């Protein structure tokens, strides 16, 4: 099996974010199980390690009615993962001096839909990309279907496709072109340099021919041509939602982001700068100029985004420093976030649940050894038992501190060191365990009273050993 120390060299291994390894078979089995439980018709997925794709797979149906399978040519709607790609595109215009992030957008192009509200004159490209315009997500979600402002632009966060599309209209104005011209400029600045052959905001003949069919959460086919909103935007560059692609093509953009291509270092600093705190629960989250930034214990940053259109769900996450990430596209409504959470936290973050449980158990067992033996040495002093108690105190400290050190290394750019430190720690543990068991054996032979704490001590030592082995050898 793949272990903690087989992090990078095995060509068949897939590294988790924390540097542990998974086999292709484990990933395949996990995906098959989740696709069935979430009723996902089709899937395109890619995983990136050290700036290259180490896993790519397509599964399921492109068209359930015709029993047509998803293949490497199949195209999906990207939905809202369009936003960070558009943000990247906009930053190329900023660096070329065509657009100023902080100049009010109305100075480039007045917006007559909201001209009655003077506050709109404060809206900038920066506010649009970071969802701080005050616009609703879409005006069509409301009975009047009219655009409105909910708060002073720049003062709060509210997710808004309208803000992105206003900025797209400004880009069209700046380029003095039509929507097809905006697409051509996107191809010139982003898609072609990164060799993204089939990633576009406006459908062409190839994309139409290879696009998979959309399904709702109950597996029913969705006729998007009958939806007036989608039909009216068939040939429109809709910046926040109409990107079309598949996992392998999209991964090329992710790798370009990791390699900081297409922008200067200052441009990337601006792109990744936090603008809005959108934290929920235990996760620290911020919104940048198109990305959701997740902080993992303030030691690692993941740049992510999810997407949901009628009949499509998407998600990607990348660590630009470790050059690690993954992306998937599926042709089912509203299942992407559930799949993303399970894929991230039950597999790609640190390995399977068995590995996580083993790591936690090793730490807890070590900590209990420290506390029990520290208490016995300080308050239940017995000279004959002090030898193994000190040894077990040392074992507990070694185990718990070693687990913490390995976890910190997994989160850092030095996570490759884990594969060397783990076997060293295991060797030291085996040595001192032998000493401890020998000391306890001699103690039992020379003492008439058989202390119950010996059973507890041995149980914890065995738990440390077994959980340590499991943590290293299971995926």
Image (cartoon, helix red, strand yellow):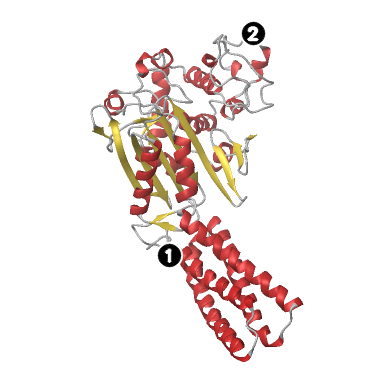
Which residue is drawn at the image coordinates 54% and 33% (left, top)? Answer: 290
Which residue is drawn at the image coordinates 47% and 54% (left, top)? Answer: 353
Q: Which mark is residue 473?
A: 1
Which residue is drawn at the image coordinates 46% and 57% (left, top)? Answer: 354
Of residues 39 and 26, which is closer to you in this image? 39
- Quadrant where the C terminus is found in the figure: bottom left
Q: Residue furthest bottom?
A: 446
Of residues 51 and 458, which is closer to you in this image? 458
Q: Residue furthest front?
A: 449
The tag earlier along the polypeptide, 1 or 2, is 2
Q: Within 10 angstroms of label 2, few (less than 14), some, or many (20 or more) residues? A: few
Residue 189 horizontal side relative to residue 376, left or right: left
Of residues 177 and 380, which is closer to you in this image? 380
Mark nearest the camera among 1 and 2 is 1
Instruction: Please tell me whether residue 173 is drawn above or below residue 294 in the rendered image.
Output: above
Residue 206 horizontal side relative to residue 16, left or right: left
Instruction: Please tell me whether residue 449 is drawn above or below residue 320 in the rendered image.
Output: below
Residue, disc 2: 116
Q: Position of residue 3 (x, y in %)?
A: 42, 63
Q: Position of residue 298 (x, y in %)?
A: 62, 50
Q: Position of residue 157 (x, y in %)?
A: 64, 28
């Amino acid at each position: 099996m793949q272990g903690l120390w087989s992090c990078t060299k095995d060509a068949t291994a897939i590294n988790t974010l924390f540097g542990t390894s998974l086999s292709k078979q484990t990933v395949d089995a996990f995906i098959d199980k989740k696709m069935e439980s979430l009723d996902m018709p089709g899937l395109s997925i890619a995983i990136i390690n050290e700036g290259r794709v180490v896993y790519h797979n397509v599964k399921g149906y492109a068209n359930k009615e015709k029993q047509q399978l998803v293949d490497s040519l199949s195209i999906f709607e990207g939905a809202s993962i369009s936003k960070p790609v558009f943000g990247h595109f906009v930053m190329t215009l900023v660096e070329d001096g065509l657009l100023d992030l902080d100049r009010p957008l109305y100075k480039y192009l007045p917006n007559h839909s909201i001209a009655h509200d003077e506050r709109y004159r404060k809206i900038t490209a920066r506010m649009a990309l970071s969802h701080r315009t005050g616009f609703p997500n879409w005006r069509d979600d409301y009975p009047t279907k009219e655009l409105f402002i909910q708060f002073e632009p720049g003062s709060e966060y509210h997710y808004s496709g309208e803000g992105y599309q206003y900025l797209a209209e400004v880009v069209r104005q700046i380029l003095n072109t039509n929507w097809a011209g905006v697409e051509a400029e996107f191809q010139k600045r982003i898609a072609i340099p990164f060799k993204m052959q089939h990633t576009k905001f406006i459908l062409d003949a190839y994309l139409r021919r290879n696009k998979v069919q959309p399904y709702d959460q109950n597996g029913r086919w969705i006729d998007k041509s009958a939806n007036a909103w989608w039909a009216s935007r068939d040939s429109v560059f809709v910046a926040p939602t109409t990107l079309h692609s598949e996992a392998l093509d999209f991964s090329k953009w992710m790798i370009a982001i990791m390699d900081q291509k297409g922008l200067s270092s200052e441009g990337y600093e601006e792109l990744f700068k936090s603008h809005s705190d959108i934290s929920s629960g235990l996760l620290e989250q911020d919104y940048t100029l198109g990305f959701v930034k997740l902080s993992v214990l303030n030691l690692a940053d993941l740049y992510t985004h999810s997407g949901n259109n009628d009949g499509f769900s998407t998600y990607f996450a990348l660590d630009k420093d470790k050059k690690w990430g993954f992306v998937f596209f599926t042709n089912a409504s509203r299942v992407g976030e559930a799949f993303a959470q399970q894929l991230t936290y039950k597999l790609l973050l640190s390995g399977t649940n068995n590995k996580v449980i083993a790591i936690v158990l090793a730490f807890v067992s070590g900590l209990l050894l420290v506390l029990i033996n520290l208490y016995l040495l300080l308050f239940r002093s017995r000279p004959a038992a002090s030898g193994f108690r000190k040894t077990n105190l040392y074992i507990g400290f070694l185990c718990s501190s070693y687990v913490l050190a390995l976890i910190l290394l997994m989160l850092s750019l030095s996570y490759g060191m884990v594969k060397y430190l783990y076997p060293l720690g295991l060797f030291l543990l085996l040595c001192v365990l032998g000493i401890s068991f020998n000391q306890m054996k001699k103690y039992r032979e020379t003492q008439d009273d058989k202390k119950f704490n010996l059973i507890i001590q041995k149980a914890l030592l065995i738990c440390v050993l077994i959980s340590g082995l499991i943590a290293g050898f299971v995926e």
